[in-house]
Image: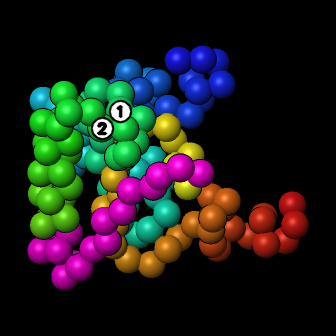
Amino acid sequence: MTGDQKWQDFYCEEVLSAKTPVEKVYETEQSLAFHHTRPYYEVHIVVIPKKHILSFLTVSNEEAEILNDVLRVVRQVASMLEKDFGACTISTNIGNYQSNKHMHWHVHFGARIRDEQGYLLDDQEKNNGF
């Protein structure tokens, strides 16, 4: 991993190393689900493999069992949100949409609370130009 790539893997560098504490939702030997540290939705959970995998498109045949585990955890978390709220959305980002270069899945419910740049939608400082 080059220096430029290091900042792009928050999950390995911060979450899995425990430098940034997270509120765990569900965990297996190969996967971790936790509340997003900067949520974009009212309820926003991230599911990651514990092994570094760049993206959904780069999963190798040898990593198929890890992907299966990640998807089982996504399903478990989605089932929890559907039970609690009646619905949820599941997504993953690829290519330029993937700002964090570690495969991850978003499971979320509710209204969007941040804009595309990551600012809180009711952030008075941003809205006032400060």
What's the residue at 18%, 51% (across, down)?
A: 71
Q: Is residue 14 magenta?
A: no
* Residue 116 placement (x, y as % from top left): 63, 64
What's the residue at 49%, 63% (across, down)?
A: 40
* Rendered view: 4 above or below 91: above
Could one spot residue 21 in this view of the protein?
Answer: no
User: In front here: 52 or 13?
Assistant: 52
Could one spot residue 40 in this view of the protein?
Answer: yes
Q: Secondary structure at mark 2?
A: loop
Residue 59 circle label:
2
> Left or right of 26: which side holds 89?
right
What's the residue at 41%, 69% (across, down)?
A: 42
Q: Quadrant of residue 66?
A: top left
Residue 53 circle label:
1
Estimate the spatial distance between the alpha carbons at disc 2 and disc 1, rounded to whole Å.
7 Å
Label 2 Cα crowd, 10 Å radius (few <14 / some 14-19 / many 20+): some
User: In front here: 59 or 35?
Assistant: 59
> Left or right of 104: which side holds 67?
left
* Residue 122 placement (x, y as % from top left): 64, 73
Q: Earlier in the sequence, mark 2 or mark 1?
A: 1
Q: Secondary structure at mark 1?
A: loop
- Frontmost of labels 2 and 1 is 2
* Residue 46 placement (x, y as % from top left): 34, 50
Q: Quadrant of the C terminus?
A: bottom right
Residue 82 circle label:
none
What's the residue at 38%, 56% (across, down)?
A: 92
Q: What's drawn in magenta, residue-wise?
A: 81-96
Q: Amino acid at mark 1?
A: Ile
